[in-house]
Amino acid sequence: MNALKQILAVTSMNLRSVPRRLGASSVIVIGIAGVVGVLVSILAMVAGLSQMMRSTGHTDRAIVMAEGASFEFVSNLSREAAQAIEDAQGIRRGVDGKPIASAEALVVIRMPLRQSGNNGNLPLRGVSQAAFALRPEIHLIEGRIFKAAVRELIVGRTARHQFPGLDVGSRVSIRGSDWTVVGVFESGGDEHETGMITDAYTLQSAFQRNSFQSVAVLLDSARSFTDFKASLARNPSLAVDVMRESDYYARQTQEFTQVLSIVAYLVGGIMAIGAMFGALNAMYSAVGSRTVEIATLRVLGFEAGAVVVSVFSEALVLAVLGGLVGGGVASLLFNGNVVSTNGGGVTQLAVPLAVDWHLVAVGIAWACIIGMLGASFPAIRAVRIPLASALRGT
């Protein structure tokens, strides 16, 4: 109990003296806040991308592509293959008795971005009539649905935010002809919101194509996936790969999120080293300014452990404060914002930054590690200074 009282007394004395050392203390807080702010902002992009893909993928939906195709853009399915897929077992049927499946064509349009003016990739997806029953999360917020056999399209809310000239009534030049924007839709912030949608056969006609890139289906239930996949495997005329929609979109972003995570911790680590040296210098200065005080306490019977704990406690308080400041600034500046990034040279991903308390907690944990490392050597020095020299202030 006596040791605990000593620790509390010395720590309290150190913390009360922080305002007198505002400059040195600010170095620790600002340095750590910068590290946490950068780390949290990059990790927010990883979290936002993962959240976007989770909202896009559903376990009761499946995507069928040509065998060996990793992405829809490199897949090609004939109309006969698409029909055979739609006739497979395990697909839910609508009130009209038809399977809820959408054979889809996909192309990329190059258009200037609103903010930078540089060309970005805007996906244009051609869908069948069942697409909106298949994806009920897609709903109009302006205008109307496109008509078949007419060069009309609807635009995702995020795409309209990224690219100029996509309001209802605007005309978009595609392959030398004008397409009319007749509606704007939202779909819960998923990947579809970053592109445009039109009729599949109209799109095929405009691009002189006769194949689809994928077939999306709504399963009877999530458990029906095995039956659906087995039904396709039994058809010798089909050479396709089948994935749950949730697995497909998770795989699409797995490598990208891994790279972003590595970048976040690499950049954060480099900045953390600088912040740690800043904390080291600041704590050395703080210990040096209290050399006589510390020596006097030791002469009065205060144990060395109490002095060490007090130095670590001061660094920890300043580190947590820096972590809270960095996390708070990152949340205010970035949470909910949308960042455009080229997804592997094919799609223009509009990633919403998501700063939550989990990321702020990660940032504060980093702040504590930086603070503790920065305080380690000054704490040791505080108790190893010879008492005679310390009492003279030398």
Image (tube, helix red, strand yellow):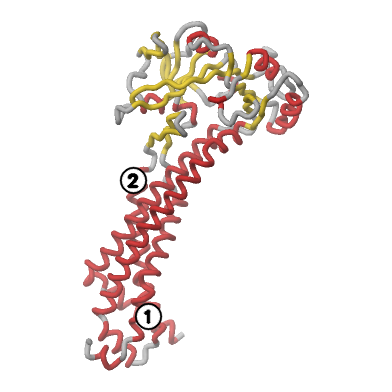
Residue at 37% in and 80% down: 380
Residue position for label 1: 380
Q: Residue 332 bears which disc, if any?
A: 2
Q: Is residue 213 above or below residue 335?
A: above
The image quarter in which residue 345 lies: top left
User: Where residue 116 sits: x, y (%)?
Assistant: 30, 30
Report x, y in % for residue 254.
Answer: 54, 41
Which one is nearer the viewer's eye here, 376 or 317? 376
Is 285 in front, or is 319? 285
Under circle 1, the secondary element is: helix
> Farthest residue in the right direction?
234
| Residue at x 68% of width, y 18% of height | 86
Q: Amino acid at mark 2?
A: Leu
Spot occupied by residue 197 in the image (x, y as percentages of width and height): 48, 18
The residue lying furthest to the top in this view is: 149
Which percent across, then down, holds residue 163? 35, 24
**Badge 2, how many Cα within 10 Å: few under 14, some, many 20+?**
few
Q: Residue at x 40, y 77 (%)?
A: 309
Distance between mark 2 and mark 1 Cα atoms? 38 Å
Q: Amino acid at mark 1?
A: Ile
